[in-house]
Image (tube, rainbow, N blue to C red):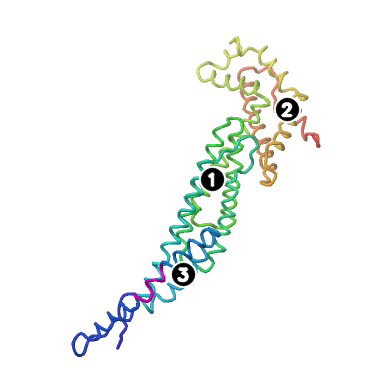
Amino acid sequence: RRVHGAAGGESAPAAPLGGGSEVSSATNVYRLMDSVFAPVQPLMEQLCDGLDKSSHMHMLTWIALVQSQAAEHARSSLYVSQYLAALLIRPHVLFTQYIDGEVEAIRKCKVSAKRCGIIWPIAQLPVFHDRLMFELARADNKDFADHALVKLTVAAFACLEHVAASDAKYGDLVRFENYHHFYTAVEERSITALAPYAAQAHALYETHRTKYIDWLIHYEFDGLVDFFTSVASLLTTTPAAEVAFQSHFSKAKLQRVHEQFAVAKRMQAGLVATRARIVKNLTKAEALYSVVWGRLMHRFRETLQSYDVIIRQCYPTEPTMERTLDEILPLPEGE
């Protein structure tokens, strides 16, 4: 005779009416079940090992199946529920070992930063997530999968920073393209576990996109940028009226810089070359050309405006530069 009331809804032995015979019977039943099912667990572990050798993802199908059975029996039999939970230990161990192996492979990843595009640890994360969700469609608890995604993401970010740091010229390009790829993929899939990392990636994408644009401007107009950066620094300690009397910042020096970088023909050629450089550097699949080019032109105009302020302060008789930009726009197509 059984009554309900044990933890988890388990049917517990009823209070004995005549001694401890019913308790003893229940104990015997549990011992019998142990003797029947004891040989099964090693067989299931061997099955898991075989599945793992066939495909690591087969572990996920097994985990989902056992989880669903454990949930189904959770309220009807504590014994069965606990037994099924024990069957999950081996596949979880094997899956953890697989993830740790992937993390180690990412750690050893060697990629050249020069036009590398989206590095494979970043590119494969969305693919891995999609496969996880497909295999775990029947699973009630996906916490272990979320934990795996986080471990892989942390490793992928570290790999990305290592690749970017290896080349100062391409570092910002590598970062902003890869962080863009990551955060858009996470947002498209609404991956809750990776939301904090997507937010971090979005912020880093914007930071390094700006740095890349600044690098592009300096690469093509280095003498112009360096001259006005130095004048701006000098203005923190020297009155504007005295700047032109400094040998390195005389009117003649300004005129040479202007002729070299800011006349219409030179400015147009520099921007056309910059546009071609962007097209060459960017990964087409990320579709970031329009964003980068639009923001570069906005940044370049702001830069010239700031230089014009300095010219009016320190060289009031010299021509300003923003109007030259207006003269050459729009740029010729097909360059």
Q: Nearer the viewer, residue 93 or 31?
A: 31
Q: Amino acid at mark 2?
A: Gly
Label 1 and label 3: CA atoms lie apart by 36 Å
When the figure is inspected, residue 247 is found, relative to residue 157, above or below; the finding is: above
Whether 270 is among the magenta residues is no
Callout in the foreground (2, 1): 1
Mark 2 or mark 3, which is nearer the start of the sequence?
3
Mark 3 or mark 1, which is nearer the start of the sequence?
3
Mark 1 or mark 2, which is nearer the start of the sequence?
1
Label 3 and label 2: CA atoms lie apart by 64 Å
Q: Which residue is mark 2?
A: 270
Rendering coords of residue 216 (x, y %)? 65, 31
Q: Which residues are magenta?
A: 34-41
Label 2 and label 1: CA atoms lie apart by 31 Å
Quick one: quadrant of the N terminus?
Answer: bottom left
Q: Amino acid at mark 3?
A: Val
Q: Which residue is mark 3?
A: 66
Callout in the foreground (3, 2): 3
Residue at the image point whose x is 48% and y is 58% from the top: 145
Residue at the image point whose x is 72% and y is 38% from the top: 279
Rendering coords of residue 9 (x, y %)? 35, 78
Q: How many C-alpha atoms fall within 10 Å of the one at disc 2: few (<14), some, or many (≥20)?
A: some
Rendering coords of residue 181 (x, y %)? 60, 47
When the figure is inspected, residue 104 is found, relative to residue 254, above or below; the finding is: below
Quick one: quadrant of the C terminus?
Answer: top right
Q: Amino acid at mark 1?
A: Ala
State the mark number for residue 201. 1
Rendering coords of residue 147 (x, y %)? 46, 55
